[in-house]
Image: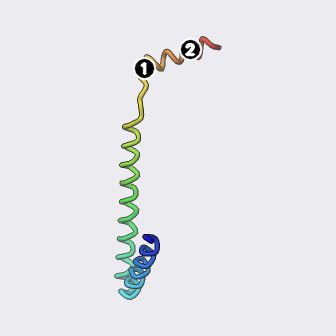
Amino acid sequence: MYLVLSIILASLLGFGLLMAGPIVGGVLAFGILAGCLFRGLYLLSDIHRGLVKDLPRQDKAKEVYEEYLRRREE
């Protein structure tokens, strides 16, 4: 349902930009597109920060111990 509504609204927006003329419509279309891209990049960055923060980090002693066990098995 939301997809159909989005398609209809995007079609109306495109028709309105086409009627506004090539200069005004082009500037508005570029602004909308650039704004969506920047917002998407911001959201991806925010998601990345949240995922990295939640990852468990190994302490140095555990890393050294695991390396010792690997060498010992060889």
Q: Nearer the viewer, residue 2 or 34?
A: 2
Task: State the image coordinates of residue 17 (x, y, percent, origin top left).
Answer: 38, 82
As drawn, the residue found furthest toward the front would be: 1
Classify 10 Å Cα crowding around label 1: few (below 14), some (14-19), many (20 and above). few
The residue that disc 1 covers is 60
Task: State the image coordinates of residue 42 (x, y, percent, origin top left).
Answer: 36, 54
> Is 37 placed left or right of 67 in the picture?
left
- Is residue 50 shown above or below 1? above
Q: Nearer the viewer, residue 54 or 44?
A: 54
The residue that disc 2 covers is 69
Q: CA distance from mark 1 to mark 2?
A: 14 Å
Q: Which mark is residue 51?
A: none
Mark 2: secondary structure: helix
Classify 10 Å Cα crowding around label 2: few (below 14), some (14-19), many (20 and above). few
Residue at image coords 40%, 82%: 12
Residue at image coords 43%, 79%: 8
Q: In this rendering, which labeled residue sits more in front, label 1 or label 2? A: 2
**Residue 5 sits in which quadrant?**
bottom left
Task: State the image coordinates of residue 74 (x, y, percent, origin top left).
Answer: 65, 14
Say which amino acid is labelled 1: Lys
Residue at image coords 41%, 28%: 57
Mark 1: secondary structure: helix
**Residue 19 sits in which quadrant?**
bottom left
Task: State the image coordinates of residue 38 (x, y, percent, origin top left).
Answer: 37, 60
| Disc on the earlier residue, 1 or 2 | 1
